[in-house]
Image: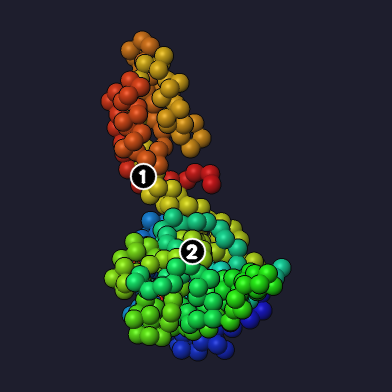
Amino acid sequence: MPGRLRRSSTRTLPFLTDILGNSLNDRLLFAVPKKGRLHEACLNLLHGSDIQFHRHSRLDIALVKNHPLALVFLPAADIPTFVGEGRVDLGITGRDQVAEHECLVPPTETTGVEEVLDLDFGKCNLQVQVPKMGNIQKPEDLIGKNIVTSFTNLTEQYFRKLEGQAANGEANGEQPKLKTNIKYVGGSVEAACALGVADGIVDLVESGETMRAAGLKAISTVMDTSAILIKSKSPSDPKLVDLIASRIRGVITAQKFVLCTYNIERSKLEAASRITPGKRAPTINALEEEGWVAVSVMVERKKIAVVMDELTAVGACDILVMKIENSRTIP
Ligand SMILES: Nc1ncnc2c1ncn2[C@@H]1O[C@H](COP(=O)(O)OP(=O)(O)OP(=O)(O)O)[C@@H](O)[C@H]1O
Ligand SMILES: O=P(O)(O)OC[C@H]1O[C@H](OP(=O)(O)OP(=O)(O)O)[C@H](O)[C@@H]1O
């Protein structure tokens, strides 16, 4: 694709050419959050996928030793732009960041990103929050007031819709409503109300600790989000994209599931199989002991304690649970 970072590296990034020579040529580019909440989990994913690299200090590009791949460390918020324009082939960022970008730059047939995989971390909600002790109870009460956020496009979209609904109400004789002011801040959004800059904020909530510590409460959810693997609409090496996606999927599955084995009388197998249906189906082997079978099955890690209780209740015994180191399974 013309204008790709690797093809024009001498023109656009001369300092990188000094350091890396022409080694970016013909490498798939993979953008990874350079800091923040997703950074560490992404490094773990790369490690689990055996993507080996050495990152020089201060340098935001690292060549991968065992694949024709280069990692580009970028702010999570910028990754949808680079991938969406086809400058970078693959990326990890939050679904919230993709949605925020798409509000401003709607995808076309050739631009914009495609979601490859939900990565099952970075889970949180983008929520409208207001002072706990104040008199604002619902998002409509914020119409015409000041909102502070790092997600100005999603917030604009949310409040314009709310204003539209309120305007329809006006036609039915309700109070006239004003336009809501939306201001950008890059971080520590939760401080805006206490500092008198905002009547409400739109910010991410995971545990709710930040929100509660700032004396705020959530009154509405704009969207749910988690980290996702995205690709451009015209990656330079689709086969390598598929290979990387398959390795990452394997690591995610291994983290999400455990392997459970147990012995049970064949007559009780049907009840046990209802508790542990497996990803596709349980593996069942006959035991030397007449009328008994051994079952081996993948179970979601978060459900395993309840599953073990239920298996015991239907007569399973010798229940063992093992960590899965890595996997290759169908999506
Ligand atoms: N508390 C959280 N829990 C889970 N995921 C989060 C949380 N906060 C942010 N994220 C996810 O991580 C993405 C990046 O947010 P983060 O605030 O870490 O980025 P940053 O602004 O680049 O880093 P920093 O805040 O350190 O400057 C968000 O878009 C969201 O998808
Ligand atoms: O519900 P919690 O578990 O408390 O998490 C929510 C906080 O996490 C994020 O900020 P982060 O700490 O990444 O830093 P930032 O405020 O500088 O963006 C988000 O913007 C909230 O402030």
Which residue is disc 1 drawn over? 302
Quarter of the image for the N terminus: give it.
Answer: bottom right
Residue 48 position in % (x across, y down): 38, 56
Q: Is residue 183 visible?
A: yes
Q: Is residue 150 left or right of residue 290?
A: right
Disc 1, SS? helix
In the image, which disc is placed on residue 221?
2
Task: Identify which residue is drawn at 54% across, 64% down.
Answer: 230
Looking at the image, residue 307 lies above or below residue 157: above
Disc 2, SS? strand
Q: Residues within 10 Å of mark 2 (few under 14, many from 20)?
A: some
At label 1, which amino acid type do we have?
Lys
Residue 215 position in % (x across, y down): 32, 72
Question: Hey, which residue is sitting farthest front in the picture?
Answer: 173
Question: Hey, which residue is sitting farthest right in the picture?
Answer: 109
At label 2, which amino acid type do we have?
Thr
Task: Identify which residue is drawn at 42% across, 62% down.
Answer: 124
Residue 109 position in % (x across, y down): 71, 68
Say which quarter of the image contains residue 290.
top left
Q: Residues within 10 Å of mark 1 (few under 14, many from 20)?
A: few
Residue 200 position in % (x across, y down): 44, 76
In the image, which disc is placed on residue 56?
none
Give the camera-side residue of 82 and 63.
Answer: 82
Say which quarter of the image contains residue 3.
bottom right
